[in-house]
Image (tube, rainbow, N blue to C red):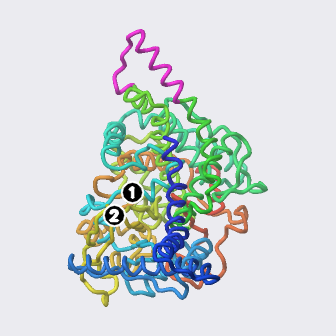
Amino acid sequence: MALADHANFRFRILKDIFQALVAPPVLVSLCCRAFNLRFGWWSIPTYLLAIPLAAFTRGQYSDFIQAREARQLGARPIPRVVGKWPGNIDVMLKLKKALASQYIYEPFLDLFEEYQCTTINTRFLWVDNIITMDQEHSKYALATGFGQFWRGTAQRERLEGFLGDGIFNRDDEKWKYHRSLARPFFTRNRISDFELFEKYAGRTITVLSNIASRDEPCDVQDLFARFTIDAASDFLFGQNLDTLSKKLPVPSSGSHSDRGSATDDSWGTFAQAFEAVQRIITMRGRTGSIWPVFELFEDKTAPHVEIIKRWLDPLVKQTLDHKAVTQKIGIRRPMEDKTFLEHLADSTEDAGMIRDQLLNVLLAARDTTACLLTYVTYFMALYPNIAVKMRQEVLDVCGNNVPTHEDIRKLKYVKAVIDETLRLYPPVPLNSRQSRPQPCTLPPPDRTYPTESRQPLYLPKSTSFWYSTLLTQRNKALWGPDADEFDPERWIDPQRVARFTSNPTMFTPFSAGPRICIGQNYAYNEASFFLVRLLQRFDTFTLATDAQPPSSLPPAEWKLGRGRQAVESICPEATMTLFIKGGLWIRMKNVHSH
């Protein structure tokens, strides 16, 4: 990553500060000199008054231009939040506080309900910032209007220090290049994948069996993150990071991270760094375009990224050195035998780019599948009848054998449970795009609020556009009055399935359009395989609330809330990806231990 890229956010905010606070008084001073005007002691108040006057003028001019463009495009403006303070500062502070303390994304839902719309412009500090739960609008950004959007400059600013030159942080030709490189490793079902799944699922089940034999609880969120990163590291690097053999968190641990009890070994340090970076980036997003003001003298992600680099850089160097040796002696290995890291090294000598691409894929491979497995296990503990039905199907199809590709395809109910979990708890519950440097129109909104106009919406140029997969996938207007209920049968009953098949972008846990997740099949196979092995060994799953950190238990007032909030036994939270606050502590029983 170039140093210039790394410093971009500082340069941008300094330019913004200059334009907002320095340029207006300077301009007034120059005008006074040019016209030989003297205000005496009124000079200082005049210069200071120039700052809000310039901001007001810029805002009015921007509104005039946007209104004219909207008329030309035959569209109406996106409804704006109206706060009591200038720049909606009061709403911004209230929303930031509420997102940190209330049920996941409930504050967004409150805004949509207050303004009776599914797409809204928060307009914090006079900067357009769009948030949507509208299926038509997210569909347009991801698929039908793909060319009107990109990841954009705002996201690059937030993520540059972490994901750098990787696939999730690039657009256009660079993104296409990264995707074409990664695609061959994720779009085919490889026998070797199942061998890896068996290897690491076996180790994970052994750890769980040892804990279960002592009737102790286990933080499965932590354990599943170890399973997915060990399997991913073998798949990507050809090396096992061996996190499953390292120290596990215990309920009495005094040290806690957002996601549970932290361990103080090298793996714990890496995991905490990984999570800390995501937390900082999320707070940047919630602070809006002014976040660099708080990091002018220190990039808060830098020390955590340094820890992550210390893990990955030796692997990259080793691969590049190995490539040099094999080239020298003329050895050529077929692509099928190469790891993803070796494949990347074949395409470039740039160690930084290789590491960034590796880190992007590692983030997806670890956090998303671990999140899915965590929430499936939560539901099996919350609804024991679901676990019984899943286990019966596993035994009917696989017995106690290692599952094959063919077996996985036959597990209709297990797949329904996975899809229903992804619907209620998509691993990436909030994502963003930015409109290109020209205005466009969003299609008429969906019919969540019947009173809302069906006219297209005007989207200004270069505007941040946030869409919530989680809120869309719980929208009762799309999914019916039982949208908040966990009901896998909705994926089996033909009439209810027809609701989705006629409108597939109402379910986008793997995104949609040209940037749809290339690891989708890998994730389904890995999660299904693991659940088969888990259900072959265990038949009872119980929430261990006594082991859960007290601060991570749902507040009593949630019982009076709406939707899933009223029945939740854990606190769902999100940074870049979804997780359970304090971990998910579960007691399991071996099949033969009763």
Reply above or below: 323 against 86: above
In this rendering, would 105 be left or right of 438? right
**Number of marks in the rendered image:** 2
Q: Which residues are magenta?
A: 316-337
Is residue 305 inside the magenta stretch?
no
**How packed is label 2: few (under 14 Cα within 10 Å), some, or many (20 or more)?**
many
Q: Give the residue drawn at x 53%, y 76%.
A: 51
Give percent across and percent down for residue 529.
45, 46
Q: Amino acid at mark 1?
A: Gly
> What is the chief secondary structure element of the magenta stretch?
helix
The disc, 1 or 2, on the residue closer to the chain's N-terminal end is: 1
**Which disc is residue 435 wearing?**
2
Q: Which residue corresponds to the image point at 47% horizontal and 86% vertical from the top-left?
A: 82
Quarter of the rendering containing residue 549: bottom right
Q: Which residue is mark 1?
A: 152
The reply to whether discs 1 and 2 touch (Cβ–Cβ < 8 Å) is yes
Residue 141 showing in the rendered view? yes
Give SS at disc 1: helix
Q: Position of residue 119 (x, y in %)?
A: 37, 77
Picture layout, residue 451 above or below residue 32: below
Which quarter of the image is occupied by the C terminus?
bottom right
- Where residue 340 sits: x, y (%)? 42, 33
Name which residue type carries label 2. Answer: Ser
Please tell me whether mark 2 sits on a helix, a strand or a loop: strand
